[in-house]
Image (tube, helix red, strand yellow):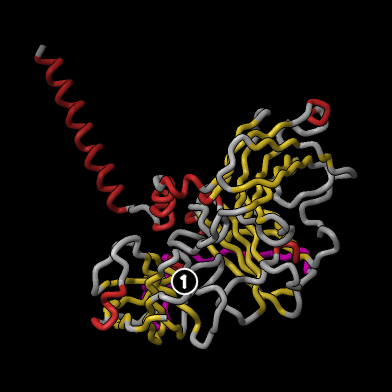
């Protein structure tokens, strides 16, 4: 009996120390901001309503012609939009048909994208696992309204011809192809899985939406890639002149940069092939400054306080208040903000911090002189409209303790 008690005491002691160790590890490794947001979205009933669900069917006569290891891609685009990045995308491994699917706000590619209205849902069974379609794939699509259930997509269009290399340009579009490799110096910092985001910008342009963006499943280094004008944010965009090609290996699937992500970039031109893009920078890792010391590289932010002018205090909504804080490059009129935050129930004065984690578009660098705009919105739309309340000031990303007075009615 004494032996049993001693054994039990040892087991309990081991369990206690393991619990302490796990708790310490959780405290030392907090969830990334983007993961927290995704969890919040998963628990938001309104966001969960913004999706389309249904079944994907694969006819038996076509099933015999498709590789058993083919990947299933599901895309959503606004009705009538054929080119550019999709509104939302999902990639799944080998699935059994009929397959029950859902795609919605949780799967949007760009921060701030609104999954609503009329959408075209398309599905592609792809033999090489690369999102760009090509001969040998089988496809199907249907138009739907966000919120629809019981939607049925039939994979009944078998693309003919020989399967092309994933590096091949499609429809004559200007393309850049090559391989992404990892710098040996940061080999130990690379995640084992994640998503690869590839961006194209005109050389020297560091702010605003990229010229083109592509998201790929990470399969290991070296990883081949193709990005073409078909991936452009605007259907009329062209790969002209010198271009900055950059890539990010992202751990949480969010296109915004976050600590632990790995990046690299180089300058090239449209039509270039055989590119070797080296990922050589770990976001948030120590970097050596000119003095030789090691300092952590932290994304810059702006911190401050929003105060309410007593003259318009009575105009503040008592219910469903939505307060936006937006950053725009100084001098920019209209267009997509550099970064944005949304607040619900607030009390004035309101303290805030806004920066890279709040970037609206993938690849956007939040830096330099900006206009900080505060808007209390009445219709739920971040765009200014009559009746909204606003205030703004100029700042530089990195400024601390700025003050913005909410003092104007639109």
| Quadrant of the drawing holding the N terminus | top left
Q: Is residue 289 in the magenta section?
A: yes
Near-viewer residue (155 or 219): 155
176 relative to 90 in the view: left or right: right
Q: Position of residue 17 (x, y in %)?
A: 21, 38
Q: Quadrant of residue 299?
A: bottom left
Q: Is residue 171 above or below residue 327?
A: above
User: Does residue 18 show up magenta in the picture?
Assistant: no
Picture residue at 46% right of the left edge, 83% below the top: 368
Q: Is residue 144 above or below residue 334?
A: above
- Residue at 71% in and 34% down: 69
Q: Is residue 300 visible?
A: no
What quarter of the picture does the C terminus occupy? bottom left
Q: Which residues lie in the magenta part?
A: 272-295
- Residue 124 lies in what quarter of the image? top right
- The answer to whether residue 67 of the structure is visible from this angle is yes
The image shows residue 232, relative to residue 27, as above or below, that is below
Q: Secondary structure at mark 1?
A: strand
Q: Residues within 10 Å of mark 1 (few under 14, many from 20)?
A: many
- Give the residue drawn at x 66%, y 49%: 75
Q: Which residue is more in the foreground, 274 or 298?
A: 298
| Residue at image mark 1 | 339
The one of 262 and 100 positioned closer to us in this rendering: 100
- Residue at 44% across / 64% down in the picture? 380
Q: Give residue 364's position: percent from left, percent from top.
A: 54, 71
Where does residue 167 sit, x and y in percent of width and height?
78, 56
Q: Quadrant of residue 208?
A: bottom right
Q: Give how far across and how far down residue 256 sits, in percent.
A: 50, 63
């Amino acid at each position: 009996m004494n032996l049993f008690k001693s054994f039990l005491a040892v087991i309990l002691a081991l369990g206690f120390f393991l619990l302490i160790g796990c708790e310490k590890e959780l405290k030392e490794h907090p969830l990334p901001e983007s993961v927290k947001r995704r969890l919040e979205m998963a628990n938001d009933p309104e966001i969960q309503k913004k999706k389309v669900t249904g079944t994907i069917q694969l006819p038996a006569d076509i099933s015999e012609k498709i590789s058993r290891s083919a990947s299933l891609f599901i895309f959503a685009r606004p009705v009538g939009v054929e080119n550019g990045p999709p509104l939302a995308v999902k990639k799944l491994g080998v699935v059994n048909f009929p397959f029950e699917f859902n795609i919605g706000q949780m799967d949007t590619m760009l921060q701030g994208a609104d999954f609503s209205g009329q959408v075209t849902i398309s599905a592609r069974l792809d033999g090489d696992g690369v999102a760009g379609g090509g001969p040998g794939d089988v496809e199907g699509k249907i138009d739907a309204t966000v919120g629809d259930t019981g939607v049925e997509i039939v994979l009944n269009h078998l693309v003919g011809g020989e399967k092309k290399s994933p590096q091949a340009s499609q429809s004559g579009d200007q393309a850049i192809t090559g391989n992404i490799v990892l710098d040996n110096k940061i080999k130990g910092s690379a995640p084992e899985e994640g998503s690869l985001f590839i961006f194209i910008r005109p050389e020297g342009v560091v702010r605003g939406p990229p010229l083109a963006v592509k998201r790929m499943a990470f399969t290991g280094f070296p990883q081949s890639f193709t990005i073409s004008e078909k991936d452009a944010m605007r259907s009329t965009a062209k790969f002209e002149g010198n271009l900055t090609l950059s890539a990010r290996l992202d751990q949480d699937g969010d296109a915004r940069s976050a600590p632990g992500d790995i990046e690299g970039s180089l300058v090239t031109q449209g039509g270039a092939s055989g590119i070797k893009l080296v990922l050589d920078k770990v976001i948030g890792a120590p970097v050596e400054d000119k003095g030789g010391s090691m300092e952590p590289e932290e994304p810059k932010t702006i911190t401050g306080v929003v105060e309410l002018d007593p003259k318009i205090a009575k105009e503040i909504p008592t219910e469903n208040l939505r307060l936006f804080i937006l950053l725009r490059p100084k001098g920019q009129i209209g267009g997509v903000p550099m970064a944005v935050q949304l607040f619900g129930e607030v009390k004035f004065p309101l303290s805030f911090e806004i920066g890279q984690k709040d970037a609206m578009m993938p690849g956007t660098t939040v830096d330099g002189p900006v206009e900080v705009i505060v808007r209390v919105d009445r219709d739920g739309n971040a765009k200014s409209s009559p009746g909204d309340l606003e205030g703004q000031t100029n700042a530089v990303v990195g400024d601390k303790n700025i003050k913005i007075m909410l003092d104007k009615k639109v």
